[in-house]
Amino acid sequence: MSAKIISGTEVAAQIREELKKEVDELKGKAGVVPGLVTILVGHNPASVSYVTAKQKTAHELGFHSIQDDQPDDISEENLLKLIDKYNKDPKIHGILVQLRCRNI
């Protein structure tokens, strides 16, 4: 048995293509547009890059998406209120919260 080289880039592209078809079917049959909000706390460059990639993919797949940037010093109470606001929004089906990575 010989080894087979798998291209992660090709596999990811195939998965995105399949998901795009599923999103289109969901929109057409049920009238539902998947919704994603990404909440970025602080402005760590790695976190910004990560969240930007998630937003880009969401747009490519045809999602309704929102990027909500928050200051590094947002209180836990205010962050939870923001999450609750999006949790109650019928257009939002997923919430990604990216907290600033603190050095220990």
Image (cartoon, helix red, strand yellow):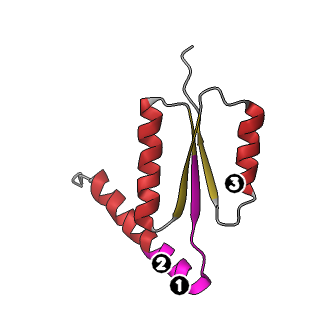
Magenta stretch? Answer: 21-38
Which residue is identified by label 2?
24
Vertical order, 90 against 4 (above or below): below
Label 1 to label 3: alpha-carbon separation:
24 Å
- Residue 17 position, x and y percent, is 37, 69
Label 1 to label 2: alpha-carbon separation:
6 Å
* 1 on left or right of 56: left
Instruction: Determine whether the residue tagged by mark 3 lies in a helix, strand or loop.
Output: helix
Q: Is residue 67 magenta?
A: no
Vertical order, 67 against 50 (above or below): below
Q: Residue at x 53, y 84 (%)?
A: 28
| Amino acid, disc 1 | Gly
| Amino acid, disc 2 | Asp
Check disc 3: other Cα within 10 Å, few if <14, some if 14-19, many if 20+. Answer: some
Q: Residue at x 74, y 52 (%)?
A: 85
Dots 1 and 2: beta carbons under 8 Å?
yes
Which residue is identified by label 3?
86
| Amino acid, disc 3 | Tyr
- Residue 86 in which image quadrant: bottom right
Residue 28's label in the rendered image is 1
First in sequence: mark 1 or mark 3?
1
Vertical order, 55 against 63 (above or below): above
First in sequence: mark 2 or mark 3?
2
- Residue 50 position, x and y percent, is 44, 41
* 12 on left or right of 70: left
Check disc 1: other Cα within 10 Å, few if <14, some if 14-19, many if 20+. Answer: few
